[in-house]
Amino acid sequence: MSATARLKTRATGAGLGDIADKLIAGERLTLEDGKRLYEAPDLHTVGALANHVRERLHGDRTYFNVNQHVNYTNICNKLCRFCAFQRLPKQPGAYVFSPEQVELKIREQLHNPVTEVHMVAGIHPKLDYKYYKDILRAAKRARPDIHIKAFTMVELDQIAKVAGKPLAEVLPELVEAGLGSVPGGGAEVFSERVRQATYHLKNTGDEWIEIARTVHEAGLRSNCTMLHGHIETIDERLDHLDRLRRLQDETGGFQTYIPLSFHPDNSEMAHVPAPTALDELREIALGRLMLDNIPHIKAYWILMDVPIAQLCLAFGADDVDGTVVEERIYHEAGATTPQEVDRTELVRWIRDAGRVPVERDTLYNVVWSDDGAREAIVGDAAPLGV
Amino acid sequence: MNAAQHAVGALAPSASWRAPLASGVRTGSVATELDRISDKVLSGGRISFEEGLFLHESADIGTLGMLADAVRMRKHPEGVVTYIVDRNINPTNVCITDCGFCAFYRRPNHAEAYVLERDEIVAKVQELSEQGGRQVLMQGGHHHKLKSDWWCELIADLKSRFPQINSHALSAPELHHFAVIEKRPVENVIRDLKDAGWGSLPGAGAEMLVERVRLIIAPKKTDTDTWLDVHRKTHEAGLRSSATMMFGNVETPAERIEHLERLRQLQDETGGFTAFACWNTQPDGVPEEHIYPQRTTPGVYLRVQAIARIYLDNFKNMQTSYVTQGLKLAQVTLRYGCNDFGGTMLEENVVSAAGCFNLQSIQKIEDVIERACFAPRRRNSWYGIDDERHDGPPSPANPAEAATHRAVSGTEVSR
């Protein structure tokens, strides 16, 4: 029996045979298909379908990078209810890094082979346009060859406001100062109902999409995310994924989709339970299955714990993020994962999942790959078994 | 450092083992063989040693999870995941067996060596009783002077004070240790303990049931044949026991399967095992830490756990190890073959001495089980459901019923 026939047989047993047909033929799934996948009791089969797509796209290759986080301020005026990181300007613990402090943070890691700095933060109402350019320049001064992935769509919106000109005009200036690409945060769940209930001061879904479109049109790549596992419904998740998919059809600018697990601790929504490991596995699988036009699906280990991120590599994920020095946002929300991990540890987890570790830079150029005696199997020659 | 200690580092296949590439099973002869074995497992057949080793060395964790989940569903179609309200008590940490992977024990006369007083133990069991506990898991080191009569008195005392709490106590190496220091057959030790009210034997001290490995990691501990024989004699005396495996030290994949094979053979013979649990060696802070390989990753744990579920076709229950793996991964194991969450413990001293401590409240355990779409139910030491949400009294309810139960269910085992 061929691998695709095997997959089909198994999916048929789980009532998902027609969906397997579409996936094997490389056809796009409908939102109704997505709903059935969210609700299918047989998680292993959903995982196998996602894995089929993952192996067709990437074989066993699993990407990571050596990166560093700089959360330059925790002062924020958006008051999102799921966030434990935010502080009001005069609140104890509120901070803003000066450009000199950002420079120092980067210099502190010069002994590490860091290729990316990931800079995201709160929406500080008083920071001026110059500040944002200054911290980009400071990072580049400390490490000229570093790739700066900075400013979520929400921060970019704020930067354009304080710059007093359209984002399309601001972006080339930020690039000039050192911006290399844009992270995917701040998308939350696009549903207006969810926005009103949890993040009503922040951009609407339509605005987020419009900013991302502008970013892509400026020639910048970005990631995209969804904050799942709180009050959103399955339909709202699917609507969110659909909007990402449609923008990607238009621009092709998304590199990676990252489902972000809601972490309730210390937030206003502390009473809402966090998604479980099995929920996280399914979310990864759904991302891989629905977002047929986004190349990479990331299991962000800092959110889900290393063991779950490792297992996600069998459920559709092909990326585990990076070494992440000094993560603050999720650690304020009770994340008990380490704030960084050794490069050799990342390699070991990936190998133990039966995958080939590949160190990438931010734009997925290969920095190092674990070729050895074993080549990754890529392409249609490697469909799924059992 | 002696020659044996050197040998652990030098002979640590776990450290150099590489997982098979996941996509490698999709095509070619590997795919054909995996198909054949999968069909066998899904149709309820027994896999051979060679087939077990093939799964270990060639299958991807996605397929292993699917197979283990199918076996779990066949054995437990009712959708229940059990756990027991229990407590660990370690009456003594004095031990003369010097296992290099153990951070818990102290040599006799060491400043931190202890033996708990009876009233301390009673107070601990009293706390457990107030929480509705059904089992006290008691293990100690191999104390050079405490003999089985000390344990018989303790067990009898607890039994009279707390009749609803079973003493799930000691281990095969401890029973063997008594037989040696008391210079009498282990059957007699077992008989005396049973008469005192001892209700079941934990599976501890199995480590790897392979002599090559034991001679390296636990050279002074009860050997493989003796470990199995103590369980056999316990089963023959009408008591049930559980089985364990500690992997991720110096054993090879074939030795992991050999361990499972030895257990399966004894289970065929006696039917006396209630459950199997495994965990990886927790090397932090153990006496010979510097010569143990790094802790294996969860990918390896899930692989071994799933293969255990597939291989041990005559074991009804598989326990997850949330204390070593954490609650999040433990939930995942419910889809990798496990149907039991083990004990709530209230206290744990042994693996927590090795840098591993994940005790959780009863409510958290129930939540995690429910959110995996299973019904959480409390059980007793013999896996009878003892829960007000369950219709009818626990069955089995006690060691005698468990022994009868075993005889009946033993005939149902698929071969």
Image (spheres, coloured by chain):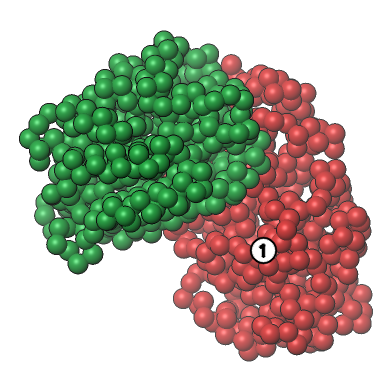
Chain colours: A red, B green
Q: Is A354 rendered above or below residue A227?
A: above
* Mark 1 surroundings: few (<14), some (14-19) or many (≥20) residues within 10 A: many
From the top left corner, tell me how far across and down residue B73 is, in percent. 57, 24
* Quarter of the image with the C terminus of chain B in it: top left
Question: Circle 1 — which element?
Answer: loop
Identify the image quadrant of residue B276: top left
* x 18%, y 40%: residue: B149
Q: Residue at x 60, y 48 (%)?
A: B363
For the question of whether residue A3 can be seen, the reply is: no
Q: Is residue A152 left or right of residue A383?
A: right
Q: Quadrant of the N terminus of chain B?
A: bottom left
Which of the pair B159/B345 is nearer the observer? B159
Residue with the mark numbered 1: A265
Residue at the left extreme?
B183
Report the front residue among B248 and B32.
Answer: B248
The subunit letter for the residue under badge 1 reads A
Residue depicted at 40% across the width and 22% down the height: B402
Q: Is residue A282 visible?
A: yes
Q: Position of residue A117 (x, y in %)?
A: 62, 71
Task: From the viewer's perspective, tell me whether residue A231 is left or right of residue B234.
Answer: right
x, y percent for residue B220: 14, 44
Identify residue type, mark 1: Asp
